[in-house]
Image: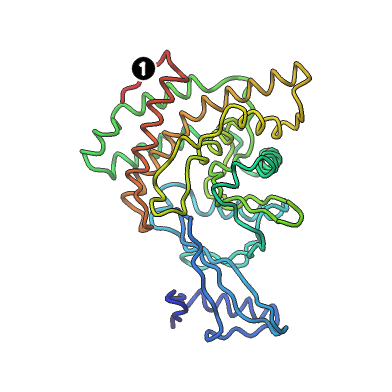
Amino acid sequence: MTVKVNGFIVPEELMKLLLNLASKWGEILDEKTMKVSHLSGAMTNEVYRISWPMKTENLSRSVLVRIYGEGVDLFFNREDEIRTFECMSKHGQGPHLLGRFSVGRVEEFIHARTLSAGDLRDSEISALIAAKLREFHGLDMPGSKKVILWGRMRNWLSVAKNLCSAEHAKEFSLDTLEEEILNLEKELSTENQEIGFCHNDLQYGNVMIDEETKSITLIDYEYASYNPVAYDIANHFCEMAANYHTDTPHILNYDLYPSLEERRRFVQAYLNYPDNDDEEKSELVEELVKDVEKFTVANHVFWGLWGIISASVSNIEFDFMEYARQRFRQYRLRKHQLLGNSESNY
């Protein structure tokens, strides 16, 4: 038996899970007093906050419910993602897993503020994110520690070719993209590059801050894997062009891409180099800043392919194809600027 709350149909198995959790906590869950709020900004899953009154007067219990999006198994292995989620909890990172059902899961609701697009430009918050990201990259996670970026891009290219129309395949030159990816891998892979456990999707909606303690929590690990840390920082910088809470959430404004000074400050905070008085440290900062810029090129291809695939499989209201166009447009532009010796086929 399903229950409808605030227009949201609560699946029977989810309702049973919520009832069991409430009972475990010594509470009584009444569907008449439940509240459901849709949390906007997510583009892989549908996310909701479900609340109900506790026995203690004027207090309520909240959990986060994640309904898996259509076609997400094309992007990552859900069981691997769950294992990552559970391991992150053991490391004291992110929310706890409270339960699973066939089309989603229930997570601990973190009482902290999710960042807005503008928060990423705040120098204090940016420094906190940088320090947290450095901690994240240092986590020792189970499984293979090999770079997954290039293999994942090739897999996504294969999926994109199978799903999109001939018109779109021609528009994005998918028949020549495999060679492009190979060239990028050769250009960007170096012997001394640092590999770490990367978030790979560090947009503002996946960062939370406790206003009192100023502690940062990174959430949503669907795309997390071992990769060059420069790629993960590049991904974060590219996300500064996005605002997913507007009337046109798919539109990217690259005028908002962080300036060289902002990028330097972030990298300084990431490396925990508070100033550049030390010549050796200064050189390390500049080297990482340059490496990060080069990896923005790969990042645009990565999320461009994601957009093409999502346009075919996702039921979330978002113009994925136009998003992909903007990403590949930036790929062409930035590849010419940063890797000028290579000719683009686009």
Is 184 left or right of 260, judged from the image as shown? Answer: left
Q: What percent of the width, then of the height, locates residue 229?
A: 61, 32
Report the side of 171 relative to 282 (left or right). Answer: left
Q: Residue at x 36, y 28 (%)?
A: 178
Q: Is residue 336 above or below residue 40?
A: above
Residue 16, quarter of picture: bottom right
Which residue of the protein is positioned furthest toward the top in this rendering? 341
Number of numbered discs overlaid on the protein picture: 1
Q: Name the quadrant of the N terminus.
A: bottom left
Question: Relative to 245, is 177 on the left or the right?
Answer: left
According to the picture, the residue beneath numbered tag 1 turns out to be: 343
Q: Is residue 61 above or below residue 154?
A: below
Does dot 1 land on a helix, a strand or a loop? loop
Q: Position of residue 276 (x, y in %)?
A: 74, 23
Residue at 33 percent across and 49 percent down: it is: 311
Residue 190: image quadrant is: top right
Viewer-proximal residue, 158 or 301? Answer: 301
Q: Residue at x 60, y 41 (%)?
A: 121
**Residue 139 is at least partly visible in this image:** no
* Between 142 and 34, the one nearer to me in the picture: 34
Quadrant location of the C terminus in the rendered image: top left
Indicate the position of residue 203 as horizontal and vertical percent values.
54, 46
Camera sees residue 262: yes
Residue 188 placement, left or right of 183: right
Q: Amino acid at mark 1?
A: Glu
- 323, above or below 282, in the image: below
Residue 88 in the image: state x and y as whole percent. 66, 51
Q: Give the class, few, some or many, for how many residues have Cα within 10 Å of label 1's Cα (few <14, many ≥20).
A: few
